[in-house]
Each structure stands twice: as C-alpha cells, then as structure tokens.
Image (cartoon, rainbow, N blue to C red):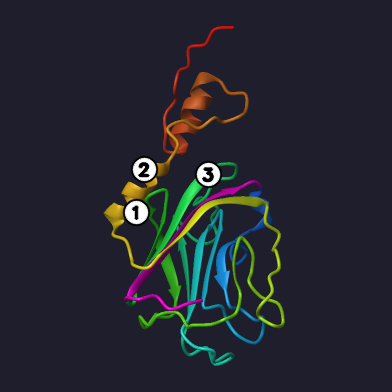
Amino acid sequence: QRSFTGTGWSISGWVRIDDISAALPANSYFTLYDTGEIPNVQQSAISIRYAGHGLNLQITGADDYPTNSQYFDEKFFVTSDLVSDTLLEGQWHHIFVNVEGNQTSAYVDGQELNSNAGGTWDGQLPKITDRAAAIGMRAALSDGNSTYAEPNNSRIHDVRIYDRSLSAAEVSALYYSEVPEFQVIEGSFTWQEAKADAEARGGRLAGLNTQA
C-alpha cells in the first residue's frame, strides 16, 4: 500500500454475489480490496469487504498490533448489519467507499448507506507497507506477501482506486454513467410478479417486441 497524495481517497467496484449464504451476517464478507494483513500479527492498511448485509471498511495507520491504536472498523448498510437487504443475490451492484480526512461514507448503486463505526477515525492516511495487496481475496499469509482466496461465490468487475474523495453527486453520476440500461432477470413470473420484482430492484419493466 502506497501513500495517497492528499487528505482523501476512495475505492469502487462492481460486484455480483452468486450465493449470498456464503457470507452471512454479521461479520462474514467477500473481499473487494485488501492490503498488508498478516493474520494475528498486523492489520491491513486498507480492507474493503461486501456482503448482502452491507459493506465493511477497515483502515490502519500504523503497524502496532495488537495495540491497534490507529485501527478503524466501520460497517455500512441499508437497515442493519444483520439484515441482507444491501446487496441482492444474482445482481450486479456498484459499491463505493469514500474517505476525506476523518469523514467516511459508502454507497451502493449511487445511494449513500447508513453506518455503525467501531471507533473514530483520526483522519490520517493508511499506513505505507510493502506487503502484498489483492483484489477479490485477502492479501496475506504468514509473510504478508502472499495471498489466499476466501470462499468467494461472487464476481468483481472494474475496481478503481482514486487519489481523492468524491462528492455524493460525483458518486451518483459515476454509477448512472456505467449502469446497464437493461438487465435480464431469469425466471418465470406473472406480469404483477415481474413488475414488483423490477421495482424492488430499483427499476421498471421493459417491453420487448420480437419476431420468431
């Protein structure tokens, strides 16, 4: 993990959970981005994880395990970290984590989430470390320079690291500039069931005229 140049930074990506039961509430997650952890020796500089019940951000400012005086852990969600209503199974979602000084925020599909911080972040930048970083897996074994995959019944696309924080308007614009206009949902539905399902996903039904 290298140092950011200013007081803010952000990380985003598109994720799709194929089996939501593989990461259940409240503390089980899939990994988007992780850097620098040595289990039971040092915390990650940055760890961003996701599940049906929300997102998890962890930041560490110094290698001082187990004191962890500069360690921050925050959960983001729609209802709570016990309810799987933040990310839906089988659907692509855009997730975005934003840090500006001591202010943190997270978004799913352009909408800001509620949070439950385990402490107060002091605003310093994540620690600098030569230990490995990884996308889609935890970045550590005993030497801190290897990677191991967690059970990851999910998919990841277009992970981005920004050297600044983004405003809520920029996060929303980013999502809407990339979201597919149409999404095909497999299954057998009545018209009313399909309409209700589309609206629950934040969309609407699209009628298609086709020829055999």
Element class at badge 2 = helix
Q: Is residue 205 magenta?
A: no
Q: In the rendered structure, which segment of residues is drawn in magenta?
A: 1-18
Q: Is residue 100 visible?
A: no
Q: Earlier in the sequence, mark 3 or mark 2?
A: 3
- Mark 3, other Cα within 10 Å: few <14 / some 14–19 / many ≥20: many
Determine which residue is flagged by label 2.
177
Instruction: Give the answer, above or below, for where 193 lies relative to 202.
Output: above
Residue that numbered label 3 is attached to: 92
Which image quarter is the C terminus in?
top right
The residue lying toward the viewer, choosing from 76 and 211, is: 211
Above or below, 72 relative to 48? below
**Residue 71: image x %, image y %?**
49, 83
First in sequence: mark 1 vs mark 3: 3
3D distance between C-alphas at marks 1 and 3: 16 Å
Residue drawn at point x = 52 percent, y = 88 percent: 68
- On residue 171, the disc is 1
Q: Position of residue 41 (x, y in %)?
A: 64, 87
Residue 87 x, y percent position in the rendering:
52, 50
Q: Residue sitting at 44 percent across and 25 percent down?
A: 205
Name the element at disc 1: helix
Mark 1 neighbour density, 10 Å: few (under 14) some (14–19) many (20 or more): many
